[in-house]
Image: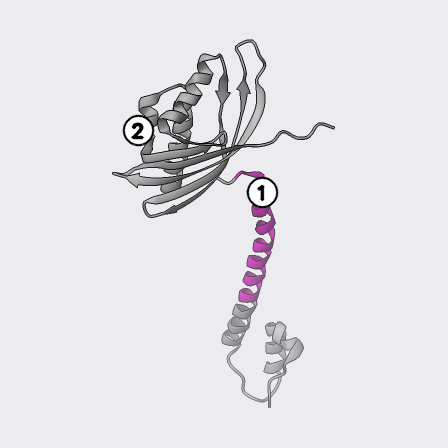
Amino acid sequence: MKQKRGLFAHFPTLHVAISRSQAVPRKPFGIHWISGASEEIMVFTRLIFLGLVALIAPLRSVAQSATPEVPQTKEAIAVVQAVRTLLAAASTDDLPKFHSLIAPGFYAFDTGKRLDGDSLMQMVMSAHTKGMKFVWNLTDPDVHVQKDTAWIAYTNVGSIQASVSAEPTPMSWLESAYLERHHGLWQIVFFQSTRVSPPASK
């Protein structure tokens, strides 16, 4: 006689009770029950796993959208640090530090001009002597590294203070740089900066 299917497949203990009352030999009670129970446990475990995945996925998405993306690899972090150090050297007129961070042949596109390293620093230092102060903060870096070369794009959020007595004017720049690694150190080959236009007044 064929085993019953359908409803009994989901209730192994009930299936065994009915089977034992019939004359046709069946598998021993214990073995049949364990086999059916194992299937139920596997199905139940899968349902729990799928439920946890469905619960965690939205939470992970919210966390990622709430937290700015930060470079995680060692190389990407080093690239970001090199550019941040360059900005700090320029803001403090530190020529030796600035020169240690730029590669031979370095040049920049800034203020609508092509400038080499010394010309760029001279422009910044000249502004400082007139009482101007710049605040630069590298934010939202997008870093791509390939062996010993890398490029980075980011938003520089800061301000310009025209004089000691003036109030700082909030300012942002869209900037990018191309870097090469020499003797284990990242050096900037090319740099460009474009000031973000202030929002139109209503």
Q: Is residue 55 magenta?
A: yes
Res 23 → quadrant: bottom right
Dominant secondary structure (helix, strand or loop) of the stretch shown in magenta: helix
The amino acid beneath tag 1 is Ser
| Left or right: 159 in relation to 113 | right
Q: Residue at x 31, y 23 (%)?
A: 96
Name the one closer to the observer, 185 or 175.
175
- Other residues around mark 1 within 10 Å, as few (<14) / some (14–19) / many (≥20): few
Q: Is residue 148 above or below residue 38?
A: above
Q: Which residue is mark 1?
A: 65
Residue 155's spot in the image, x, y percent? 52, 34
Position of residue 86 measured from the top left corner of the image (x, y, whole percent): 39, 28
Is residue 44 among the parts visible in the rendering?
yes
Whether residue 71 is visible, yes or no, is: no
Q: Secondary structure at mark 1?
A: helix
Residue drawn at x 33%, y 41% is 180
Q: What residue occupies the far top of the structure in this picture?
A: 165
Using the image as rendered, state which of residue 79 and residue 22 is in the foreground.
Answer: 79
Q: Which residue is mark 2?
A: 100
Residue type for callout 2: Ser
What is the span of residues highlighted in magenta in the rendered image? 41-68
